[in-house]
Image (cartoon, grey):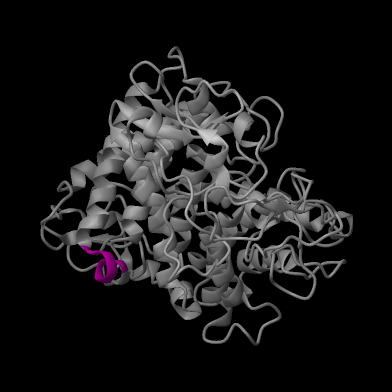
């Protein structure tokens, strides 16, 4: 996607050809099947001799050894000391056993999808364009003997570095819709690339420094001295385009309660949407803090995803034990970002643990129009719709940051909050996968939802599930991919999300909290969804209208 039509979160863009689907399928198979008792991915090689662990050292974590892989270290090493037949998650309570032949088969298939799709370096990394992310994963998971993947990543970073060099503020601006989002996503990729190439001196690596420059710009190192993260710094946005934050008095609400809202370019909103990254502008001095501006002041779950991972990377690569002494406190902002994800929660909230006191329970009958339970998940942006593809991309990208920069999360003291936040979303995707013939990809209709400006807690005074004789009520339908209504892209994105998250939840910390079975459950669903997506990869099949909206629309 991103290959045809106008560009922007508000625009629905039809996929012109199969490139995006091949990209998704390639991305999704890299992670789900390469899981071992250590819970991480492996270097793909038919023979041990292709991997010289001793020469690659700890900064090149893609070695494979049939013994201990001790020459590599790092998050992506694969230890196969019991013959390569480990159950997912290292437990006996779920997951399929995977041997080296299965690993090779999946990666060969990924290579074929990339080749058939004629994928190059990509123009950005986002919820609807993941080529650069796929190339980075292939760089990590293969030995890159012919320099295919490092070359593609080189072209990608050259383009992004060039954008910053042509800017007076050093900011890599690419599009009007969410420029901060695009730059932050590329900053995450740059931080990961630096980790694998810095040779132990990451703080001076070109890619790490560029990543820091982009995040620093968003935190206030710009001509306007303006932070684009709500709640951080001396001057930050107070009027995001967000219904819940603009409505008062705030939770707890009861059905029938009255409410008011503020949304203009003068008055601060009643509630602070801490940690949200706003879309931003080409220049910091051009930015206007206006609640009605759904371009510059848009917030969304995918806007924060790469930004969050990049912050964890900067904590790990730059500030070790003390981020507070740096120009910007990356660790503090990392924690704030997960507060934003708490503010986006739909369903039943735990008031005893929530850090967002003005939010309460909402939409407790989602899915009832089709007799299923779709309660929970995240609202996409400043609205109350749950869109499948942006949510899944957010899970995949947050997972990438957690896999690569777990030490950064630990240093910041945010690992448990991050796991809790991620699980809120993966639990919903598991619900949405009712069966291989019924996969829910959207809850809510964008048109009706955007007609209601108020708190989600009182929305059901104005919405109805299913048919209604009351024309004054708004509709909140749920949409599924079925054998008759297809949605290859979003199903594949679900596979990617659960695949990546299965690795996150196989870490020692996650297993201690949630048990090994949860990672195995995510992995099994990811494999099933991947098979469904692959079987649907046929452009002649009709895509369900709202399933495509669920992937390709958004915002609000």
Q: Quadrant of the N terminus?
A: top right
Q: Quadrant of residue 70?
A: bottom left
User: Residue 180: percent from the left, percent from the top?
Assistant: 70, 54
Relative to the observer, which residue lies in front, 285 or 425?
Answer: 425
Percent across and percent down for residue 197 are 51, 65
Q: Main secondary structure of the magenta part?
A: helix
Q: Residue furthest front?
A: 256
Residue 312 drawn at (x, y percent)? 53, 69
Which of the 4 quarters of the picture holds residue 129? top right
Whether residue 365 appears in this view of the structure is yes
| Frontmost residue, 414 versus 311 | 414
Q: Which quarter shows the C terminus?
A: top right
At 88% across and 54% down in the image, what residue appears?
A: 286
Side of 511 relative to 317 (left or right)? left
54, above or below 433, in the image = below
Task: Pinpoint residue 331: horizontal percent, then vertical percent.
Answer: 57, 76
Relative height, residue 283 to residue 481 (above, below): below
Q: Which residues are magenta?
A: 510-515
Residue plotted at (44% across, 34% down) = 441
User: Would you say residue 514 sits in the magenta stretch?
Assistant: yes
Q: Is residue 322 magenta?
A: no
Residue 60 visible, this angle: no
Q: Residue at x 45, y 67 (%)?
A: 351
Q: Residue furthest top?
A: 540
Left or right position of 505 against 325: left
Of residue 441 and residue 528, the one placed in the foreground of this image is 441
Q: Nearer the viewer, residue 204 or 309?
A: 309
In the displayed structure, 319 sits above or below 362; it is below
Residue 185, by quadrant, is: bottom right
């Amino acid at each position: 996607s991103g290959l045809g039509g106008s560009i922007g979160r508000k625009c629905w863009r039809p996929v012109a050809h199969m490139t995006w689907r091949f990209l998704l399928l390639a991305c999704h198979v890299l992670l789900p099947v390469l899981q071992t008792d250590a819970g991480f991915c492996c270097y793909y090689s038919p023979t041990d001799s292709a991997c010289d662990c001793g020469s690659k050292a700890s900064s090149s974590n893609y070695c494979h050894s049939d013994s201990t892989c001790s020459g590599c270290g790092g998050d992506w090493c694969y230890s196969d000391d019991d013959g390569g037949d480990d159950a997912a998650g290292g437990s006996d309570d779920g997951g399929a056993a995977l041997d080296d032949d299965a690993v090779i088969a999946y990666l060969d298939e990924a290579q074929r999808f990339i080749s058939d799709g004629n994928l190059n370096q990509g123009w950005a990394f986002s919820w609807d364009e993941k080529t650069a992310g796929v190339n980075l994963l292939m760089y990590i998971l293969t030995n890159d003997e012919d320099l295919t993947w490092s070359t593609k990543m080189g072209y990608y970073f050259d383009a992004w570095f060039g954008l910053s060099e042509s800017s007076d503020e050093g900011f890599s601006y690419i599009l009007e819709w969410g420029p901060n989002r695009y730059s932050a996503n590329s900053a995450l990729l740059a931080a990961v690339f630096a980790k694998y190439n810095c040779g132990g001196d990451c703080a001076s690596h070109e890619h790490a420094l560029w990543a820091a420059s982009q995040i620093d710009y968003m935190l206030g190192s710009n001509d306007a001295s303006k932070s684009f993260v709500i709640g951080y710094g001396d001057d930050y946005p107070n009027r995001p385009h967000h219904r819940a934050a603009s409505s008062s008095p705030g939770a707890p609400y009861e059905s029938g309660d009255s409410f008011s809202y503020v949304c203009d370019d003068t008055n601060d909103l009643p509630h602070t949407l801490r940690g949200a990254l706003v879309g931003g502008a080409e220049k910091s001095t051009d930015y206007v803090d206006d609640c009605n501006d759904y371009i510059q002041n848009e917030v969304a779950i995918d806007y924060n995803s790469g930004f969050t991972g990049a912050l964890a990377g900067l904590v790990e690569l730059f500030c070790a034990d003390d981020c507070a002494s740096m120009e910007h406190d990356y660790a503090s902002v990392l924690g704030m970002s997960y507060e934003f994800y708490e503010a986006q929660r739909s369903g039943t909230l735990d008031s005893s643990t929530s850090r967002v006191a003005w939010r309460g329970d909402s939409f407790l009958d989602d899915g009832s129009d089709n007799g299923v339970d779709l309660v929970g998940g995240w609202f996409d942006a400043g609205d109350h719709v749950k869109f499948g593809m942006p949510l899944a991309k957010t899970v995949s990208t947050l997972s990438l940051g957690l896999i690569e920069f777990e030490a950064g999360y630990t240093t910041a003291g945010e690992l448990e909050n991050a796991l809790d936040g991620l699980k809120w979303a993966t639990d919903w995707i598991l619900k949405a996968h009712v069966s291989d013939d019924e996969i829910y990809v959207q809850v809510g209709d964008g048109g009706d939802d955007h007609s209601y400006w108020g708190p989600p807690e009182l929305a059901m005074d104005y919405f109805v599930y299913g048919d209604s004789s009351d024309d004054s009520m708004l509709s909140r339908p749920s949409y599924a991919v079925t054998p008759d209504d297809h949605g290859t892209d979003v199903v594949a994105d679900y596979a990617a999300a659960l695949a990546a998250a299965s690795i996150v939840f196989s870490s020692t910390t996650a297993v201690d909290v949630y048990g090994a079975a949860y990672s195995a459950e995510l992995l099994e669903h990811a494999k099933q969804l991947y098979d469904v997506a692959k079987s649907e990869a046929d452009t002649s099949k009709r895509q369900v209208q709202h399933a495509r909206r669920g992937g390709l629309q958004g915002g609000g």
